[in-house]
Amino acid sequence: MKNKEIKVLLASPRGFCAGVDRAIEIVKKSIDKYGAPVYVRHEIVHNKNVVESLKNIGAIFVEELSEIKDKTRPVIFSAHGVPKSVPSEAENLNMEYIDATCPLVSKVHRETENLNKNGCHIILIGHKNHPEVIGTMGQTPKGSIDLVESVEDAKKYENKDGKNLAFVTQTTLSVDDTKEIIEELKKKFPNIKEPKKEDICYATTNRQAAVKKIAKECEMFFVIGSRNSSNSVRLVEVASNSGCPNATLIHSESIIPFDKIATCNTIGISSGASAPEILVENFINDLKKKYSLKIEEVEIIKEEVTFKIPGKLN
């Protein structure tokens, strides 16, 4: 069906954000400075392609510091952030560590610390067991933060100890879902303290807005990203909720549904903040083998955010 013409709306911005760029650069520069191997605690970002490419140049990925055989080698903490116990453990082991936590996640960490110092009980809006949530909950003493995952959770939530309440959020959530949870919390607890500047990061917000803009024009929508990438999974949800009848995540093991695509006149494509652009290009090239494509990039905003890497790596 090579002669079938399909219009492709390419959402922009998409793909790597400043925090991901910085984290990957930290791993590369650490290998340049210290030589291989360099250890990385948890996937540096949630993308198999990125992780494999870094393994190939000398990064070894572990889930816990106890797995590191040679404690004289440096360890890098992933972009998602870590509980305070992790750098403490590294110090006790006399290990050199480099923190690749995204600065926007670090901002949430500082917020939780300050709120705790000021006597507030904290509600974290996020997804259970996500590394970012584990990291944020580990910034303050156990029991000082409660996790709320849904509007239902917010409705059921009780302020048991009567302290002043405050909320913070995971940076990669759906803007719309979070808004509903926040509205419910404010309705139930009118004096709840909120962040001075919202916690959902600029890249998450921009990528969701770009998908929203084009989703209703598309019969199918494809998000390139990993299954464990929170922001990629949210983009699929945003496309579905914004009027696209069939939104799908394309990950490393996906089989492209060419038969279904053949029935479409217009499809949409975006990618998660941890997905390299080469994966989008590969997906489009696979489509080009089957169909004649008319590609239109729809840009809603130009991103010019960059984050500095730690001085000791320069």
Image (cartoon, rainbow, N blue to C red):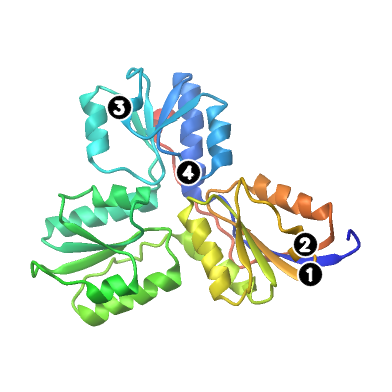
Select label 1 or label 3 by which is in front. Answer: 1
Task: Report crowding for label 2: few under 14, some 14 to 19, many 20 or more residues within 10 A (C-alpha).
Answer: few
Q: Earlier in the sequence, mark 4 or mark 3?
A: 4
Q: What residue is shown at x 16% (from left), y 56% (from top)?
A: 144
Q: What residue is shown at x 33% (from left), y 74% (from top)?
A: 151
Q: Picture quarter containing residue 309?
A: top left
Q: Picture quarter containing residue 93?
A: top left
Tell me: 291 left or right of 28. right
Assess whether mark 1 and mark 4 are in contact (beta carbons under 8 angstroms): no
Residue 17: which disc? none
Q: Earlier in the sequence, mark 3 or mark 2?
A: 3
Q: CA distance from mark 3 to mark 2?
A: 48 Å
Tell me: 27 left or right of 85. right
Residue 45: which disc? 4
Select label 3 or label 2 by which is in front. Answer: 2
Residue 66: which disc? 3
